Amino acid sequence: MSEDASETELEKAYDPRTVESRWYPRWLEMGVFHAADKSDKPAFCISIPPPNVTGSLHCGHALYTIQDIYTRQARMAGCNALWLPGTDHAGIATQVVVERLLKREGTDRHALGRAKFLERVWQWKAESGGRIDNQFKVLGFSLDWERYRFTMDPQMSRAVREAFVRLYEEGLIYRAERLINWSVGSQTVLSDLEVESEEEDGEIFEFAYKIAGTEEEIVVATTRPETMLGDTAVAVHPDDERYKHLLGKELVHPFVDRRFPVIADGILVDPKFGTGAVKVTPAHDFNDFATGKRHDLPMVSIMNKDGTLNANAGEFVGMERFAARKAVKKRLDELGLARGTKRHRLAVPRCQRTNTVVEPMLSEQWYVKTEPLAKPAIEAVQTGKTVIVPEEWTKTYMHWMTNIQDWCISRQLWWGHQIPAWYCKACSKTTVSRDDVSVCAHCGSKEVEQDQDVLDTWFSSGLWPFATLGWPEKTEALATFYPTTIMETGFDILFFWVARMMMMGIHFVGDVPFKKVLLHGMVTDEKGDKMSKVKGNVIDPLDVVYGIELEKLVEKNRDGGATEAALKNVRNTFPQGIPAYGADALRWTLATYPPQQRKIPLSIKRVEGGRFLCNKLWNAVRFALPSITGAALDVAPASLADRWILSRLSTTAAAVWKALDEFRLDEATTALYRFFWNELCDWYLELVKPVLAGPDGPAKAAAKATLAKAIEGTLRLMHPIIPFVTEELWQKVPRAADAPASVSLAAFPKAEDYPSDPGAEREMAALQAAISAVRSIRSEHEVHPGASVHVRLVAGDAVLGLLEAQAEAVRTLAKVEPLEILASGAERPSGFATSSAGEIEVQVLLKGLVDSAHEAARIERELKRLDKDLTAMRKQLSQPNFTDKAPPEVVAEARARLVELETARGRLEAGRGLVAELAAG
RNA sequence: GGGCGGGUAGCUCAGUGGUAGAGCGCUGGCCUUACACGCUGGUGGCCGCAGGUUCGAAUCCUGUCCCGCCUACCA
């Protein structure tokens, strides 16, 4: 629409593109998203789960809409609401991106050196990082950009050092040599959580070790034959009779000059599995490592960090690990020691980032001692200081926390927070310090060198909720907003992140980092399959917002690595490409899914539904605007319809509050949709049309005021979910004299803002039933919608007055003329079909309009349906067990229902006469 | 192996002790001047299977079968 269109004229169809682009800048100008450090209002805070600085918007991020809904609602509800934005430096991911760039330039980070490389990363970050921030703006996220944080900012880095040093001083951080998960692909150690095991088809290879000085042998099995080069024992079960005589005997290694014993170990060995003898490789297997410790076995490391074999591997030195695997098998075979292979399913550990197979290796790393930190974190959830929603995740949290392993926090990367530990070349002692060290704290030597490694990204992320608020400074923001109100994130990072924030927050600030943890499911495609570039089923939120042509979409998928089959699928799923649905449509749609479901199967069809809703809203306002512009709002509701719609609005406001409180956004959207579409539009608007078209007077003034209030209230209630269209429309409708400049700052409607009127709701239900009954008969008989029909409504005294008062509504909404309203007992005249709407009998003149066969069919069908219900109801009421034991109100209800069914049946029976009458013509 | 979640209308899912719901789809009739991104009427489900508790169960309990996810050291 053009900017200078008159106040009361809107385009016929809602176009999100023009509306959505204009509001975000204005909100920023108005400063509506900025929260004060100090305020009289209650504090509300969500710190955003920081997306990777390398990232760009995907559907998972689009779910941040949930956080925006809560933040916007809190803001409107009068809170000092802060949604704090930021990004994460994402150690491995970012380094991989920049290294790829360097490779294209024909160089690498080692050629560049650490300092130059880091310069390069910062440069990359300045150019390409933070793209996602702008994408968040497209979605309308009400983030307080003045408080933007990046995990590598000086202030955040300071927090990281402070945390590290304190934990070190408290003995909660230590350095140790252990078996670790080594990612050959990214050349760093990984924490347990970053290793993903997937079952794959593999094989199990059996071979024999000879007993020294005899021809006797012992057969062992392995899925990684090359590790035999590091074997330092073979273990059998202590009670295994087969091998008892071999215990303590020496085995001869066929390739390297080493003899090692047969040992007894009841923990490692299951005598029923395989041969009952297990080769032990303490330096390359976690179980074997433990076994090695128990038996004090030598630890022979056979592998270099790049995955090639080292000097301990004898003739295989220098070979790549998988080539070595083949070679070892071949040589064993040549020596006559191979004993065959079997197919075998096994769990292969892979690196999350590079998908390369992870190798257990011996290495010295930094660890956080987690048990003392976990204990209070467990208690906080047990005592309800932090509540996890949905509740069933509490168990998972507890289970993980109670079985927690020490956390390996060093990473062999350059991009990240370098570990603040300095090693002295003179006295070889370690100095850990908040400030850079140039002199050894122990001997005063200047020969100190900082640890080359950086910290796990999750270490800094664990400090996020309080470091973003200024910690370790005792800032006002920290005092105001900590503990934060809600942490809203995917259940998949409950351990990665939520658990660690809990541990760190409690330890460093002395209180939990958030009062509530809301965990949502994973966005998938509509069939429930994980979105993946290869499958070509990825929905880019921006494509949904702006739209994309089919060919461009296909091209984009092809660039993403989609297979031909996947591209075909893209063409099938989006034959016309994707239309511009707008951010509101996407937001609405995401909010209609129960967030706590495991899967959120996003369907483009449903997004279309979201756009329909926005369009409907637009058009409802378009219709109402000429009537309500300038209307006096302080007029009380007058008609039944007026009282009813405001009562429904009151109920709806209550439902929305309740739904949000229970983390049931689906229920919130359902309540809003029902109210707006099925009540406000379908009934109220239709009911007030004649009034608004009629002469001026008190009734019209009341209708105008009510319509204005209902629409204005709806816009405010919907605003947290669909901020753009509601803001645009809210600016045009009449509102309170003291209303703020933006609906974002207007009060969020409460149930008590509108008069509840149960009487009006009851009466309206009766009226609706009567009108529906007439419509139903009309439609059954294919009476043309334009044709009026003669209707008689027969009812008892209780509803007679209502019908008389609402005659106009019946006439209009059911296209009735003439309309007779009669007291009970009025016989069905010839030519009228009959039906029931609760207590009301509805008689519709069909003579001359339809043929008898139609009516006969309708009656028989209705009778069949009624009889089914009647039989069930009679049966239930005939059982003394029911009438005696069920609560009286339930029995009474059943009796009333029976009467109603019988009455309806009687009327229908009588209606059979109509068939003959119609036939007679 | 352990844990968790799910199996309700063609599809995607709500419902959690008292007459089976929504959206989309399908379908009949309508361009009724807010909206065809619409209006209006309808079709469609023995609520995975088997027991049990109860006057009454999709809803609670037990068992069982499928599907998914997480987790675990079977060489």
Image: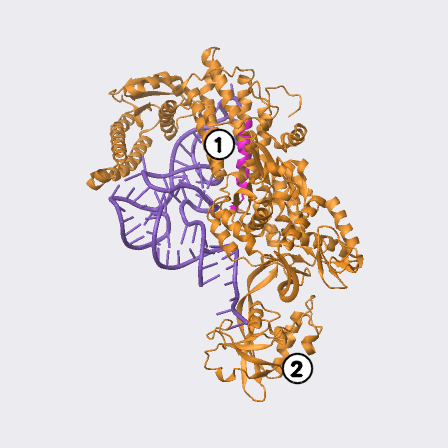
Which chain can be seen in orange?
A
Left or right of residue A657, residue A298 in this image: right
Pinpoint the chain carrying mark 2. Answer: A
Query: What number is the disc on residue A257?
Result: 2
Q: Which type of secondary structure does the marked residue at label 1 adopt?
A: helix
- Amino acid type at circle 2 is Asp
Q: How many marks?
A: 2
Q: Colour of chain B?
A: purple
Residue A247 position, x and y percent, is 52, 82
- Amino acid type at circle 1 is Leu
Q: Residue at x 47, y 82 (%)?
A: A242
Q: Which residue is mark 1?
A: A672
Q: Residues within 10 Å of mark 1 (few under 14, many from 20)?
A: many
Quarter containing the C terminus of chain A = top left
Residue stretch in magenta: A600-618
Q: CA distance from mark 1 to mark 2?
A: 78 Å
- Residue A689, relative to residue A24: is it above or below? above
